[in-house]
Image (cartoon, helix red, strand yellow):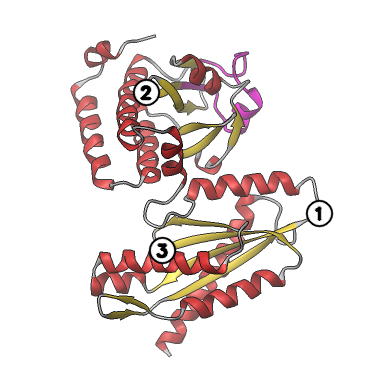
Amino acid sequence: MIELTQCSAILDKDSLLEIIKFQTDITKIGPDMGSILTLITEKSMELTHSEGAVIELAEHEFMVYRAVAGSLDPFLGLKLLIDGSLSGKCLQSGKIMYSKDTTTDERVDQATCVKINARSMVIMPLIHNETSVGVLKIVSSKIDAFDHHDFCTLKIISEIVASLIHNSAKYAIDHLLHKASHDALTGLYNVSSFHEHLFELLNTHKQSVSSFGLIILDMDGLKTINDTYGHQAGDNAIIEFSQRLKNITRENDIVARLGGDEFALILPNLKEKQECADFMQRFIEKVNEPCHFEGHLLPMGVSVGCSVYPNDALDASELIKIADNAMYAMKKENKAKLKA
C-alpha cells in the first residue's frame, strides 16, 4: 500500500517530532513490556485521531488483545481465532490491511467488528525475525476514516514496535509473549492476562453451574513506604506482597498485578461464597506482618473485596465493580481505624 521510505514526505514536521518524542517516552518506562505496549496503543490512537487502538499478539491459534486504548479499553484480554479475521489475514500475509467499511467487507469477522464498534480499521503487522508475531490496529466508528497520513504514522510506529520486540526477544517468541503477559517486577500475570483469564472463565462457566471468585487487593501504605524509604523499598514491598499472595494461593488460582499497588486473584471452582471470605481473612493476617528492607521494618497492610460468579453478577465489568467497591469500603474503614 505505502512504503516506509515515502512516509517522511507524507508526514509533516510536527507529526515526525511527536513520533520522536514518543520513542523517548518509551525508553523512560524501562523493561515493563505490558506498559510499553499500552503506551504504544495510546500514542497510535492519539497520532491517527482514531477512536481506539489495540496490539494483538498471536498465541497458538488465537489473537489476544494484549494492550488497548480508547474505545477498545473494555476488550483488554479478548481472545479471537486467527482464522476468519482481518487481523489474522494481516498476520499471515505480513501486509498492511485496510477495511473502509467492515459491514460490507467479507474479509473481516463482522460479529466482532459490531461488538467493538469498528466500522473502519487499519491493521499493521508486527514483525520479529521476518515473522509476523502480532498486529497493531486502529479503529473508527465512521466509514473510511483513515488516509495515507494515518497509514504512514502506523507504519513508523510498527517499525518502533518491531525494534522493541527484537531487543526484548532476540531468540524466542515465547519470551516475548511471556513479557507481554506478565508483570516485569513481580512475575505475576499482568492486567491483560487477568482480563483474558476472566473472559475465558466466564465463557466456560456459562456452560455449567459452577462458581468462581474474584478478589481485588490493594496494598495499604505503599505511598508512605516510597516517601519515607524510597522507591527501591516500595518495589521490595510490592515483591514481598506478591510472594505472600502466591504462597497462600492454590496451584490453579490466577494471581495478577493490575498495576501500581493493585492486585487481583481469581479463584476457580468455588464450592461456596464463604471460601472467598476465608481466603481474604487468611491473607489479611499474613500480609499484616511487616516486611524487612535494609535494616528497616516496613509496615504492610491490605484492603480487599470480592465478588462471586454467578451469585453477584454474570459479566466481567460488574464482577470487577462489586469487588472494587468492597475493597474501597475496607480501605476507607482501615483509614478510619488509623485516625481513631
Q: CA distance from mark 1 to mark 3?
A: 33 Å
Look at mark 3 in the image and give the residue it sits on.
261
Q: CA distance from mark 1 to mark 2?
A: 45 Å
Residue bounds of the magenta highlight: 99-122
Dot 2 lies on which element?
loop
In the rendered structure, the answer to whether residue 118 lies left or right of residue 8 reads right
Of circles 3 and 2, the one toward us is 2
In the rendered structure, the answer to whether residue 194 lies left or right of residue 69 reads right
The picture places residue 60, in percent across and down from the top left corner, at: 57, 31
Q: Amino acid at mark 3?
A: Asp
Q: CA distance from mark 3 to mark 2?
A: 36 Å
Comparing 101 with 277, the one in front is: 277
The reply to whether callout 1 and callout 2 are in contact (CB within 8 Å) is no
Comparing 175 with 99, the one in front is: 175
Dot 3 lies on which element?
loop
Identify which residue is drawn at 50% across, 45% down.
192
Look at mark 2 in the image and give the residue it sits on.
129
Identify which residue is drawn at 30% across, 23% down.
156
The picture places residue 227, in percent across and down from the top left corner, at: 25, 71
First in sequence: mark 3 vs mark 2: 2
Residue with the most extreme front position: 171
